[in-house]
């Protein structure tokens, strides 16, 4: 049995990750939490003017209109019920509301997974897709899984080389063809090999494309159809890799890819390089897709499963 959740039996590693997550969210926290804390904490009265300013700060932090409205509506209702005596109570209530929005983004616990478990990775150029695949392969390998990689980004020669380098570094097999080969053919061959050789997980790379390039999205649909000639359920997962630094533009990417492909999850990269990490709330509120993994650094260990409570506490600077 394989679980999306991390192995909680390794406290030193967990402590290291939580510290790294908190550090990785430093820029977002400066924009988000410190701004809110300076506004809220120390206030002896919670009034409409304070809530209005809080609403503005949330919007500036890329939390999004829908998520912000949900938070403000709840806080306003609490004020009317005399449940928020001061700024500290308001800040605590804000944490609860942030958790309420993000909890649906927690990946569902997996039961017994098919073998091979096939994951099709998609995204725009520059989101960090190929690097993310290498990090995911390393993570799954650490959970005792036998991994196969498919170099389906045949448009960019460097992507094939990059994936091969990841494979060599971690002793993971990579299925490739010549430059300019048909991506669907590469992934078809990889899926055949995954079944024939008993691999646990197949991670398939694809060429980066803009969400507005409908003809290229059609190519991804073709990849899925070709995979289904071998396994009607393939791919078992289709994950969109998102650069967290693009802020509200991420919403349009998710909408278009989801409409075209039926996404089953998101991977957010580069959270350590942006002050726009609040987009996590906007995406979750609007689209409800699970966030499978988040990246907060360049290192191979810097991509880990998303856990809503960890994220919120790291964002707010709370000690776990």
Image: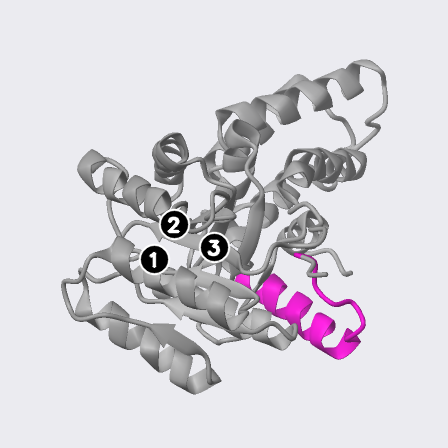
Residue at position x 41%, y 62% in the image: 192
Q: Is residue 71 magenta?
A: no
What is the secondary structure assignment of the residue under circle 2? helix
* Residue 46: image location, x then y, percent: 74, 25
Q: Which mark, by number, is residue 119?
A: 3
| Quadrant where the N terminus is found in the figure | bottom right
| Count of all numbered marks drawn on residues in the image | 3
Residue 297 lies left or right of residue 207; in this view the side is: right
Instruction: Name the residue at the left extreme.
Output: 180
Label 2 vs 3, first from the N-terminus: 3
Q: Is residue 251 above or below residue 129?
A: above
Res 55 quadrant in image: top right
Label 1 vs 2, first from the N-terminus: 1
Q: Residues within 10 Å of mark 3 (few under 14, many from 20)?
A: many
Task: Give the CA distance from mark 3 to mark 1.
Answer: 13 Å
Label 3 vs 1, first from the N-terminus: 3
Q: Is residue 212 above or below residue 132?
A: above
Q: Residues within 10 Å of mark 1 (few under 14, many from 20)?
A: many
Instruction: Name the residue at the top extreme.
Output: 80
Q: Is residue 128 visible to us here?
A: no
CB-based contact (under 8 Å), mark 1 and mark 2: yes
Residue with the mark numbered 1? 188
Mark 2 or 3: the one toward you: 2
Residue at position x 40%, y 54% in the image: 121
Q: Nearer the viewer, residue 233 or 257?
A: 233
* Residue 91: image location, x then y, percent: 73, 38
What is the secondary structure assignment of the residue under circle 3? strand
Residue at position x 72%, y 24% in the image: 75
Q: Residues within 10 Å of mark 2 (few under 14, many from 20)?
A: many
**Magenta part of the protein: which range?**
4-24
* Residue 76: image location, x then y, percent: 71, 18
């Amino acid at each position: 049995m394989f679980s999306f959740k991390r192995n909680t039996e390794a406290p030193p590693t967990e402590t290291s990750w939580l510290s790294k997550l908190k550090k990785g969210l430093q820029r977002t926290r400066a924009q988000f939490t410190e701004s809110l804390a300076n506004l809220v904490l120390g206030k002896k009265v919670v009034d409409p003017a304070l809530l209005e300013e809080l609403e503005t700060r949330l919007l500036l932090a890329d939390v999004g209109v829908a998520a912000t409205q949900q938070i403000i509506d709840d806080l306003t209702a609490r004020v009317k019920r005399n449940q928020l005596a001061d700024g500290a109570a308001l800040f605590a209530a804000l944490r609860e509301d942030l958790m309420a929005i993000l909890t649906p983004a927690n990946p569902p616990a997996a039961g017994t997974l098919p073998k091979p478990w096939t994951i099709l990775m998609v995204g725009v150029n520059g989101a960090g897709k190929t690097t993310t695949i290498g990090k995911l392969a390393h993570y799954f390998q650490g959970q005792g899984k036998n991994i196969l990689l498919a170099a389906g980004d045949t448009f960019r020669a460097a992507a094939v080389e990059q994936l091969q380098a990841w494979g060599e570094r971690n002793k993971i097999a990579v299925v490739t063809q010549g430059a300019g080969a048909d991506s669907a053919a590469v992934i078809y061959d990889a899926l055949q090999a995954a079944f024939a050789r008993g691999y646990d997980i197949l991670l398939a790379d694809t060429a980066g494309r803009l969400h507005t390039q409908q003809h290229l999205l059609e190519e991804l649909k073709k990849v899925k159809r070709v995979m289904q000639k071998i396994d009607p359920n393939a791919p078992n997962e289709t994950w969109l890799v998102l650069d967290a630094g693009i802020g509200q533009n991420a919403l349009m990417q998710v909408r278009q890819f989801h409409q075209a492909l039926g996404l089953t999850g998101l991977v957010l990269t580069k959270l350590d390089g942006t002050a726009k990490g609040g987009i996590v709330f906007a995406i979750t509120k609007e689209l409800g897709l699970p966030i499978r993994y988040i990246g907060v650094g360049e290192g191979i260990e810097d991509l880990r499963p998303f856990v809503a409570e960890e994220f919120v506490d790291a964002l707010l600077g709370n000690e776990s």
